[in-house]
Amino acid sequence: MTNMPEAKLAREAELCYATLALATDYDVWHETHEAVSVEAVVQNLLKNVATAKDVLRRVIPAIAPPRGCECPSLLKNTVITNPKAFPGATRKKLELLLDPYFPRERSRRAPAAGHPRSKPASRSPLQ
Ligand SMILES: [Zn+2]
C-alpha cells in the first residue's frame, strides 16, 4: 500500500522508480461516497487498466535510455560502512550491488600447481 519497500529496493538497485497508482473506489476514506459494489470496482478496474496502458505508451518513450538521472550511481556515496566490516555472507549476498564500488580483494597468492594460470606464458610466434 505504501510502495515503500519497492521504492527502497529500487533505490538500492540503482533503478529509476515511479509509481502509477489508480484507485478503484473511495469507500476507505470518503465518508459521503456511496457504498462500493463489486460491479463498480470491476468497472473502475477495467478503466484503470486502459488508463495504465495509455500512460505507459506515452511515458516509456519519454524515459528511454540513456538515463540522465543519478539513479545509476546512487550507491556510490551512500554506503558508509567500512567494506572490510561487511560480514562475508552479507558481502556475498550484496556483491551485485557492491562490487562496482567496493571491489573485493582477490587472493594475491600464486595459482595452485595445475591451475591453468600456473603454467608459464607461452611465447608469441612473433617473439
Ligand atoms: Zn532515475
Image (cartoon, grey):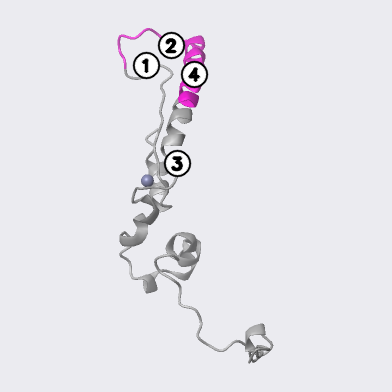
**Mark found first going from the N terminus, 4 or 3:** 4
Residue tagged by mark 4?
45
Q: Is residue 83 left or right of residue 118?
A: left
**Mark nearer the viewer, 2 or 4:** 4
Q: Disc 2 or 1, which lies upstream in sequence? A: 1
Q: Image point 51% across, 10% down: which residue?
A: 39
Which mark is drawn over residue 36?
A: 2
Q: What residue type is labelled 2?
A: Val
- Residue farthest to the front, as pictured: 126
Amino acid type of the residue tagged 3 in the rendering: Ala
Position of 80 relative to 48 (above/below): below
Front one among 85 and 110: 110
Earlier sequence position, callout 3 versus callout 1: 1
| Residue at the (31%, 59%) spot, across then down | 78
Magenta span of residues: 30-54
- Check disc 1 and report its element: helix, strand or loop: loop
Give the amino acid type for the residue marked by disc 1 in the picture.
Answer: Tyr
Q: Residue furthest top?
A: 34
Majority SS type along the magenta span: helix
Labels 2, 3: front one: 3
Mark nearer the N terminus (2 vs 4): 2
Query: Where is residue 69 drawn, in percent x and y?
Result: 34, 48
Q: How far apart are marks 4 and 1 (CA)?
A: 13 Å
Distance Cα–Cα, label 2 vs label 4: 13 Å
Looking at this view, is 18 or 23 the one in front? 18
Q: Where is residue 86 in the image (x, y as percent from the top left)?
A: 40, 69
Residue ID for mark 1: 26
Residue 84, quarter of the rendered image: bottom left
Give x and y (percent) for residue 34.
37, 7
Disc 4 + disc 3, Cβ < 8 Å: no
